[in-house]
Amino acid sequence: MAKEAPTRRVEPRKLPSRKSSRERVDAILNATRELIAKDGLETLNTNQIAEHAGIPIGSVYQYFPNKQAIVYALVQDYLTELEARIEAFPMEKHLKKGLNHALKMMSRTVTAPSTFAYERKLGRILLSAMDLYPELRELSDAHVEFCADSAVQHLQLAGSKWSVERLRKLGRYILEVRRTIYYAPEEIMPDAIRWQEAATIAVISQCFED
Amino acid sequence: MAKEAPTRRVEPRKLPSRKSSRERVDAILNATRELIAKDGLETLNTNQIAEHAGIPIGSVYQYFPNKQAIVYALVQDYLTELEARIEAFPMEKHLKKGLNHALKMMSRTVTAPSTFAYERKLGRILLSAMDLYPELRELSDAHVEFCADSAVQHLQLAGSKWSVERLRKLGRYILEVRRTIYYAPEEIMPDAIRWQEAATIAVISQCFED
Amino acid sequence: MAKEAPTRRVEPRKLPSRKSSRERVDAILNATRELIAKDGLETLNTNQIAEHAGIPIGSVYQYFPNKQAIVYALVQDYLTELEARIEAFPMEKHLKKGLNHALKMMSRTVTAPSTFAYERKLGRILLSAMDLYPELRELSDAHVEFCADSAVQHLQLAGSKWSVERLRKLGRYILEVRRTIYYAPEEIMPDAIRWQEAATIAVISQCFED
Amino acid sequence: MAKEAPTRRVEPRKLPSRKSSRERVDAILNATRELIAKDGLETLNTNQIAEHAGIPIGSVYQYFPNKQAIVYALVQDYLTELEARIEAFPMEKHLKKGLNHALKMMSRTVTAPSTFAYERKLGRILLSAMDLYPELRELSDAHVEFCADSAVQHLQLAGSKWSVERLRKLGRYILEVRRTIYYAPEEIMPDAIRWQEAATIAVISQCFED
DNA sequence: AATGAATGAGGATTCATTCAT
DNA sequence: AATGAATGAATCCTCATTCAT
């Protein structure tokens, strides 16, 4: 019989305070980012991370209780950055120029991907990882909550008459649409951003029409 | 130094001819599908697959040279099915009722996901796997080629004046948009399909406007 | 605890009588010879032998009860051939031209290796195998007996006054000397045969001097 | 088709520095020596080695990258010892008492085997292993080079007029002759050493006569 | 008799994590 | 606190041999 895959604790063992601690945590995270971008998640291993980061394996476990926690922190960092962008978007300001302008700007700043290919590739992998690893589900869920809430606020502010429940659903779907762009390969990149804008607006527009 | 993760051979060891062989291959693949849908890819192991399929481990290796090859076959099956749907779409017939109608139908039949939650979940995992496991990259690339080619044909048939190169790019992007729906969670499902339709059409429409 | 390495039965399962049976046995043995000469004994496996011989694996087990028996038969063939050469040596005839001449001729015909490099290489491997695989010990022992007995006869005939026990020991040692030549690499080959002759005679001469 | 047997890496994973590391490496090597002398190479397995050495299997792999590397180290140790004996032989000193005396002493000290039966048995197995396992070929080749070079030096010093090429060949052949004694069974042992001496000298003498 | 798919015990190797120093 | 050698459960995969067809 297949056993249940147990979910392990993922909180960092301690919050690094000394400067060198913060540096070490960053070294670990960056090494992990590079290894994941290079070889994927399947072959990732902690000794490799320590070696690549130039840090003894014992010290890695000083900062992270286990391997999952490293990937967890990576995803957390990533989502936090996305959420910061959403939080910072000044919907009111843009609404003054009209709904269309507001939607266009929101699409450009909130849903647009990094302009750096490396970050896009990493983002793509991290998003995939959230689907494959149960440990990351809680982060994913919290992010979904955040984005949905935020969407409700923004869209109500913009004048949508949809119910909160429906707007939340729409927010969750927009989140998925936004992923599209992370999955877009390099080769189609200048165009893809514009198409992404069109797709986002087409979806969002729904809640102003019905 | 991080070594290159070697890519392993993934062709099935032999083409099963006897009836029971085909059955066994199916049993292996189905067991794997269920285990993946249940616990994800990380904890998947060959002994578990064999046990779940009710087949001795040695027999698993009679049909597949290694563990990766099983996942590879799964993804291959999955993509083949998607491609069959694309190939079967009768664009000409729908064009008679106008471009808008044709696009809507294409979006509904070609880019819409299975109506079965289990298949959507599995699809979502397999799509993620393509990003995380280097062994699957070649399958992913071939699928992208197929879809891009197909898009060029359909869109030219529908009257787009864009160059082949541009249409190919668009085709590749649409492929990514379609993924959106696989990543859409159950809870937003009836609505999401309609939004998906809107997003797809918004993107495709671009090539008829410029 | 390390278990005793069990010795398995090694008699051929049946004596092949039909022509095609004999051919099949030869095909198996020759395939094995080639594989051993190519990759050594460690990686030798029965499925590989069957494939290389163009014979189904099931049929291999019709003629040999197990893998060891194949190698056993190979060594047996090889030793039988060496023994035939010894048995055929006409010591009396050569003695007529004197002891020195007899020793020289014996060295040339009895202890000289095949002139074919492939056979020398195979011989070298088979001789090594006799040291490494307990299953072959009995063949090796019997061969030693045969050679020692034969040496006693030949050397007494040639006039040695040593005791039978001592001559037997000498015979066993000569057998080892003869191995030398099988271990001689290609590159030194024309000369090595002459040196081999000198070494053999030097050893044999001992029993006529004391 | 028979595939090429791949040669695996055989360098020790790390050079042990701590005292206990060196002890562990020795424990592994000695356990392996005993198991090989007892049961041969065919049935040797890593778990057995670990158990016999009183060391966890994981630790075995801390010092050796794979099973082959252990045998490789064993053979290397063995050949190094043989080479040390050759390097230490004071040909000049012995030449003062004449060529015959020098050759006799060289044969006695350089080409004679250990007086310990256990070591002879192990040596015999290791020498056989060099023929059977492709991984050991490079060690064998290097040893041949060393011995041939050394022979050239010694024999030139002793006054041989042969060309370097010819002396090298002779050196390689003497190496093979020396093996004889390792293959000599226990029962003929006191005598065999003397016969070995005679054989060696007979061969070496060739290069002073022509 | 001939076949070759099926079997599963056995063996090599990895790697997350610990803990003695 | 910092280290990195040590651990052994876990997992992949092989292959000699059998036996149903």
Image (cartoon, coloured by chain):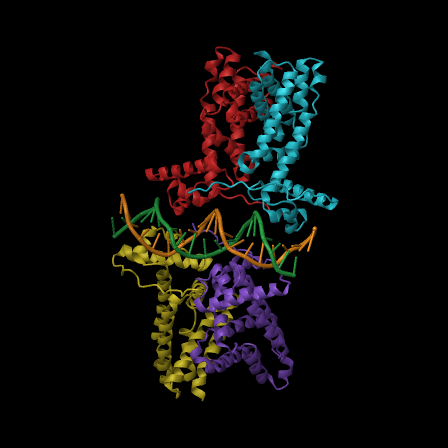
Chain colours: A yellow, B purple, C cyan, D red, E orange, F green
Q: Position of residue D173 (x, y in %)?
A: 58, 25
Seen at 50% across and 77% down, the residue is: B116
Q: Toward which corner of the image does residue C68 lie, by quadrant?
A: top right
Whether residue D208 is visible here, answered yes or no, is: no
Left/right of residue A86 with respect to residue B128 in the rendered view = left
Outermost residue toward the top in this view: D97
Outermost residue toward the right in this view: C19
Q: Work out which quarter of the rendered image holds the C terminus of chain B and state it.
A: bottom right
Tell how many labels: 0
Seen at 68% across and 24% down, the residue is: C109
**Relative to the observer, which residue lies in front, A18 or D118?**
D118
**Relative to the observer, which residue lies in front, B6 or B196?**
B6
- The relative height of residue C145 versus residue A112 in the rendered view (above or below) is above
**Relative to the observer, which residue lies in front, E1 or A207?**
E1
- The relative height of residue C97 versus residue B118 in the rendered view (above or below) is above
Left/right of residue A15 with respect to residue C189 in the rendered view = left
Q: Toward which corner of the image does residue A89 lie, by quadrant?
A: bottom left
Left/right of residue D138 with respect to residue C189 in the rendered view = left
Q: Position of residue E13 (x, y in %)?
A: 46, 49
Q: Position of residue C119 (x, y in %)?
A: 65, 34
**Relative to the observer, which residue lies in front, B126 or C2?**
C2
Q: Position of residue B63 (x, y in %)?
A: 58, 59
Whether residue B8 is visible here, answered yes or no, is: yes
Q: Toward which corner of the image does residue B154 lie, by quadrant?
A: bottom right
- The relative height of residue A202 versus residue B52 in the rendered view (above or below) is below
